[in-house]
Amino acid sequence: MPDNIPSPDALDRTLAEMRRQLGAAKVGKAYERRINRRSFLMRTATAAALAGGGVYVARDNDIDLPGMGADVHTATAQISRIELAASSRITLAPRTAVDIRHEQGVSLVRLRHGTVLFEPGESRLSAAIRVETRMGAVETISAPFQASASSQSLAVSAADTPVALHGQKGQLVLVPAGCTVAMSPSGMLRTTSLWDDVRAWTRGDLIVESGTLRDVVVGLRPYWDGHIVMSPRAADIPAAGVFSLLQVDRTLGQLGADFPIQISHLPFRTVLLTAIS
């Protein structure tokens, strides 16, 4: 077996180490199914590589990335910019999937998951856009905004001009300038936000204010070609600061120096973060 292909029992060692540090109840069935599937694909790829004389290394983020059937999707650590009407554009963050069409002068973007940043052209000509998600839709004309969506959440941030947010149940919510509105099944939350901090990821920075390590890890995951797993205690540790998205391995190492956590590197580029007692 080639040296850079994990051995078949690497899966068992990974799960055993996670159960030892987190407790058996914390290792969810969903993760086990996912890593088992990856193990199967890895072993199949290994057999094919040996038969063909080559080496094939599968990364789970490329295999399991949702939205592969979308018009445009970005991979781990990939940022993509798409030009729209009137010199406007949208920027897709890593692990984002969208469908795009144009109707009667309006750019219609279906955001399946991930983050999109809309910016009008320098002339601020009329550039109408509608971003649709499972939780609602954002509409504006030449007003910069950012939308982040998952299957059960939607967060919209406005720059210097309010934008309209249509909720899943038809309610109209105005997102004021300099604010972020987050919607989820548990309700709606409005907070103030600095536009330069909101779009910091476009220059390789993650800015967290008055958050937790969970917020840091959520921001780092789209830039890491593996798994980042946390214990509940580690996830709740207060955190704030500027974290680099350009070299996530170094950022993870810095977390171990700055916070009371232990970092363990497991097979399949799995990083385990646990709180130090």
Image (cartoon, rainbow, N blue to C red):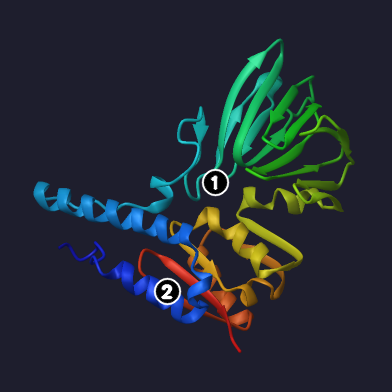
Q: CA distance from mark 2 to mark 1?
A: 23 Å
Task: Where is residue 54? Give x, y as percent.
Answer: 15, 50
Q: Residue at x 78, y 28 (%)?
A: 139
Q: Residue furthest bottom?
A: 277
Does residue 193 sit above or below 104 in this rendering?
A: below
Which of the two marks, 2 or 1, is nearer to us in this view?
2
Is the Cβ of the residue at disc 2 closer than 8 Å to that at disc 1?
A: no
- Residue type at mark 2: give it: His
Query: Where residue 155 sits: x, y (%)?
Result: 74, 45
- Residue 132, given in percent of the width and then of the height, sits at 69, 30
Q: Label 2, on which residue? A: 265
Q: Secondary structure at mark 2?
A: strand
| Position in image of residue 240 (x %, y %) | 73, 69
Question: Could you tell me which quadrant the C terminus lies in?
Answer: bottom right
Q: Is residue 163 left or right of residue 264?
A: right
- Taking depth in this image into account, of 153 and 156 the one nearest to the observer is 153
For the point 38% across and 76% down, the residue is 16
Three-letter code for the amino acid on which mark 1 is drawn:
Pro
Quickly name the residue at label 1: 94
**Residue 97 vs residue 200: left or right?**
left
| Residue shown at the point (79%, 20%) measured from the top left | 125
In the image: residue 162, left or right of residue 199: right
Q: Earlier in the sequence, mark 2 or mark 1?
A: 1
Q: Quadrant of residue 39?
A: bottom left
Mark 1 crowd level (few <14, some 14–19, many ≥20, 10 Å Cα) = many
